[in-house]
Amino acid sequence: MKELVPKDKYGVFADANDTARVDSLYVAKYFEKEHFHVLRDIARITDTKSGLSEDFTQSNFERTFYRDSTGRKLPCYMMTRDGFTMLVMGYTGKKAMRFKELYIRRFNEMENFIQTLVTARKDFPLLTENIRLLHENPKPYHFSNECDMINRIVTGMTAKQFREAHGLEKGKSIRPYLTDDQVRMLETLQKVDIGLLVAVPDYEQRKRYLEWYKAKLMEKTA
């Protein structure tokens, strides 16, 4: 399965459709179960006689394969939050409860990350793609900090502040509500910032460069 955000140490990741998922191999590891027992549990709850709808099963349990240390191709599953919840519902004991809580927290964090990435990608597609290339394991702030910086320079406020000021729903792109000049400036600064991310690691220094560049552009059009 193609990954938008790579697996963390608990096997939670974002797939190419912006959905948080978890690898059954990691669930087996952290819940201290043999993987074939986890596969057995998944087979039981996804059986047509289990009571789960076919739509739920197809949406939340994706069968795929991995290669073990000997090179054998073996089955595993990539589960959504709902699939994971259905699977571990019957896992009991203090340790199981602790890991259920941990995974719920990781799903929340990954889903917040996906929302940040999706929102940033709408307005800054080139920038977000290059941030992903620069950081092996990008964090939400890698995207939000950079996008907020450019939005502040151009509009005087972050995207969140802009949405609040204009009564827009959370996560909605602000681009359709900007002037043509603001959109052009956003596009220009996005391209400049892509180069600065490599050459100038310091955030404040990048901000000063972009502010200076914007001022120069404004002088030329004045």
Image (cartoon, grey):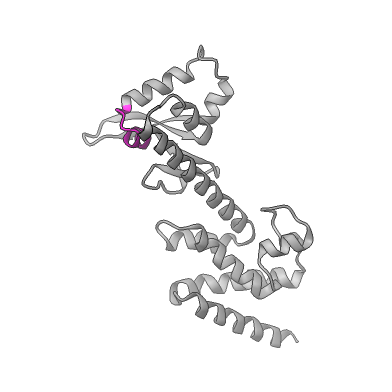
Majority SS type along the magenta span: helix
Give coordinates of residue 184: x percent, y percent. 69, 71
Residue 14 visible in this rendered orientation of the protein: no
| Quadrant in the picture for residue 147 | bottom right
| Quadrant in the picture for residue 34 | top left
Q: Nearer the viewer, residue 99 or 201?
A: 99
Q: Which residues are magenta?
A: 25-35
Specify whether 99 is left or right of 121.
Answer: left
Give coordinates of residue 48: x percent, y percent. 51, 14
In the rendered view, tell whether residue 12 sits above or below residue 211. above
Q: Nearer the viewer, residue 160 or 13?
A: 160
> Which residue is the extreme one toward the front?
94
In the rendered view, tell whether residue 181 sits above or below residue 107. below
Specify whether 160 is left or right of 100.
Answer: right
Q: Quadrant of the N terminus?
A: top left
Residue in the picture at 55% in, 67% down: 146
Give coordinates of residue 139: x percent, y percent. 47, 58
Specify whether 19 is left or right of 178.
Answer: left
Residue in the picture at 54% in, 61% down: 143
Give coordinates of residue 66: x percent, y percent. 33, 35
Residue 52 visible in this rendered orientation of the protein: yes
- Count of labels in the image: 0
Magenta-colored stretch includes residue 171: no
Magenta-colored stretch includes residue 29: yes
Residue in the picture at 63% in, 56% down: 122
> Which residue is the extreme one toward the top?
49
Residue in the picture at 59% in, 71% down: 149
Q: Quadrant of the C terminus?
A: bottom right
